[in-house]
Image (cartoon, helix red, strand yellow):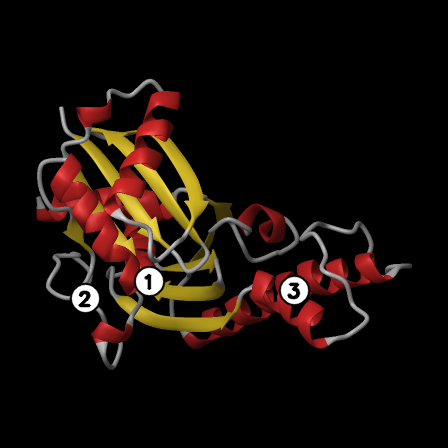
């Protein structure tokens, strides 16, 4: 039995998942720290694995997707020193099974390709994957399983911080659904703008994408804030918080 540790390093958070063969046995979300050392990863992972009842030395394979290049060094050293060998890195040269139609395929973020692979594997049809991360991205997959391209916008957390930092009298607010669009206080007004504003942006862009392509496109949401925004949209048809981890498992199997 293969025990695979899949690691998705985002700009804000890092998501880790342990697969026993085909089954995702446990997953965690931690803060991304680019300078974290291999020994720090070892202490952190041992604690998380112990909490779930995993033997510390059970991991025998790894795969890393990262949009933070400096973070890969410590992770890769962790795999070499503590897991018996290097992890597979998602990047140029890896077998994805998905043609990339971007003008320069090397520009596409690793997480975007991983999401696209997982979505097409799940649905076997044209897809739009909306990932609510530090940036919000829309990635389009054709019915033939090709990565067509997509859209990038500032993430909801970035927008919330920009309001706090650049408007002197506006506070830092929790990202939460305020209940009404027409709010009666400053915090709720900001929450309405962020949550309902982003839901409207998602719908507008998905509508434009669907109008631009010549085939039906199922819309799937992922990322930490997906559950908050997806329920306020009319275009998102499914939410999968673990889509990226599933995609990493698929890519590992295609390259192992």
Labels 1 and 3: the sequence-earlier one: 1
Residue located beneath label 3 in the image: 160
Could you tell me which secondary element the residue under label 3 belongs to? helix
Residue located farthest toward the top when viewing the structure as drawn: 53
Check the image and report above or below for 171 versus 9: below
Label 3 to label 2: alpha-carbon separation = 36 Å
Circles 2 and 1: CB atoms closer than 8 Å: no
* Residue 124 visible to an observer of this rendering: no
Q: Residue at x 24, y 20 (%)?
A: 55
Figure quadrant of the N terminus: top left
Residue located beneath label 2 in the image: 99
Q: Position of residue 109 (x, y in %)?
A: 31, 66
Check the image and report above or below for 220 versus 160: above
Left or right: where does residue 140 sit relative to residue 238? left
Which numbered mark, 3 or 2, is in the foreground of this view?
A: 3
Residue located beneath label 1 in the image: 68
Could you tell me which secondary element the residue under label 1 belongs to? loop
Left or right: where does residue 176 sit relative to residue 239? right
Label 2 to label 1: alpha-carbon separation = 24 Å
Q: Residue at x 34, y 72 (%)?
A: 149
Could you tell me which secondary element the residue under label 2 belongs to? loop
Q: Mark 2 Cα within 10 Å, few/some/many (few <14, many 20+)?
A: some
Labels 3 and 2: the sequence-earlier one: 2
**Quadrant of the rendered structure where residue 218 is?**
bottom left
Residue 83's mark? none
The residue lying toward the viewer, choosing from 80 and 140, is: 80
Figure quadrant of the C terminus: top left
Left or right: where does residue 230 sit relative to residue 12? right
Q: Residue at x 19, y 66 (%)?
A: 99
Residue located farthest toward the right when viewing the structure as drawn: 184
Circles 3 and 2: CB atoms closer than 8 Å: no
Q: Position of residue 101 (x, y in %)?
A: 24, 74
């Amino acid at each position: 039995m293969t025990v695979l540790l899949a690691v998705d390093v985002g700009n804000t958070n890092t998501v880790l998942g342990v697969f026993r063969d085909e089954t995702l046995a446990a997953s965690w979300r931690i803060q991304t720290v680019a300078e974290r050392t291999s020994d720090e990863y070892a202490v952190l992972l041992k604690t998380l694995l112990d909490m779930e009842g995993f033997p510390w030395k059970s991991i025998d394979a790894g795969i890393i997707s990262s949009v933070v290049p400096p973070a890969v060094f410590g992770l890769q050293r962790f795999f070499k020193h503590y897991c018996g060998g290097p992890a597979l890195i998602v990047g140029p040269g890896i077998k994805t099974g998905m043609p990339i139609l971007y003008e320069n395929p090397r520009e596409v973020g690793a997480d975007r390709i991983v999401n696209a692979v997982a979505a097409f594997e799940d649905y076997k049809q044209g897809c739009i994957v909306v990932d609510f991360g530090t940036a919000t991205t829309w990635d389009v997959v054709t019915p033939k399983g090709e990565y067509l391209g997509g859209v990038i916008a500032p993430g909801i957390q970035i927008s919330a911080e920009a309001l706090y930092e650049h408007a002197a009298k506006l506070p830092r607010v929790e990202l939460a659904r305020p209940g009404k669009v027409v709010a009666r206080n400053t915090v709720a007004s900001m929450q309405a703008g962020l949550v309902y504003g982003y839901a409207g942006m998602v719908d507008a862009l998905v509508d434009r994408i669907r109008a631009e392509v010549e085939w039906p496109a199922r819309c799937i949401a992922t990322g930490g804030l997906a559950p908050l925004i997806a329920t306020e949209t009319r275009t998102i048809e499914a939410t999968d918080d673990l889509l990226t981890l599933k995609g990493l498992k698929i890519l590992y199997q295609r390259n192992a």
